[in-house]
Image (cartoon, helix red, strand yellow):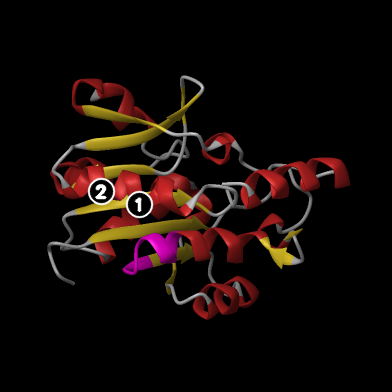
Amino acid sequence: MNSQNIVGILLAAGQSRRFGSNKLLYQIDNEPMVALSARKLKSALPHSIAIIKPNDQNIRALLENEGLDVWEYDEAEQGMGYSLAYGIRISWPAKGWVVALADMPFIHQKTIRAVADAIQNDESIAVPRHNKQHGHPVGFSHHFRSLLLSLNKDIGARNIVIQNERVLTEIDVQDPGVLIDIDRPFSNRESNRESNRESNK
């Protein structure tokens, strides 16, 4: 992989315990949530991969259909940190990574691109900010590879961001999707509201 590339990593190995079923297959505008999330990431970052649980064939098929390279990880159930560290390991060398979550399908493509552009310009960590709140996806330069590889808890890379605020670039966006992760089924009213936001981006 070209060392100048920024790689998109879609974390799609969650257990969906609070949702009650595999939430990544949940339909939004008649499409599975995971397909929408993958499409946004791939459109912004052609070099994108996805990490999934072993033998999750439905998710694999959807992600491959969107053009992502899909990797199964045996220890995905141990938590997000394990999956992210695996994604960093298999995508090296890279100039940086943009880490996206598969249950956040409303993020605008241009927001993902803005995070990637910041990393391409050698900013160390980049996060989008909406209404003064940090959101997703989060970008990391290659300088943080060792720390990312050491992750082993279900907190992702949050501690790395907190401990390195001095090199944090905040990107103000008019994109409420950076704050919306789906942990329960939408009501019809909620689904229509988010779809309208997306169509008006």
Nearest the eye: 181 or 114: 114
Q: Quadrant of the N terminus?
A: bottom left
Please name the residue that numbered disc 1 is placed on. Answer: 113
Q: Residue at x 77, y 56 (%)?
A: 21
Work out whether residue 151 can be spotted.
no
Identify the mark at residue 37; answer none if there is no mark.
none
Please name the residue that numbered disc 2 is placed on. Answer: 117
- Counting from the top left corner in percent of width and height, residue 25 is at 70, 63
Which quarter of the figure has residue 2?
bottom left
Alpha carbons under labels 1 and 2: distance apart: 6 Å
Q: Which stretch did the figure color magenta?
A: 41-48
Work out whether residue 8 can be spotted.
yes
* Residue 37: in magenta span: no
- Counting from the top left corner in percent of width and height, residue 85 is at 32, 52
* Residue 44: in magenta span: yes
Q: Residue at x 31, y 68 (%)?
A: 47
Identity, as a three-letter code, of the amino acid under mark 1: Arg
Which element carries disc 2, helix, strand or loop?
A: helix
Does residue 198 appear left or right of residue 108 in this picture? right
Which element carries disc 1, helix, strand or loop?
A: helix
Check contact, mark 1 vs mark 2: CB within 8 A: yes
Q: Residue at x 71, y 59 (%)?
A: 22
Q: How many residues crowd mark 1 within 10 Å: few (<14), some (14–19), many (20+)? A: some
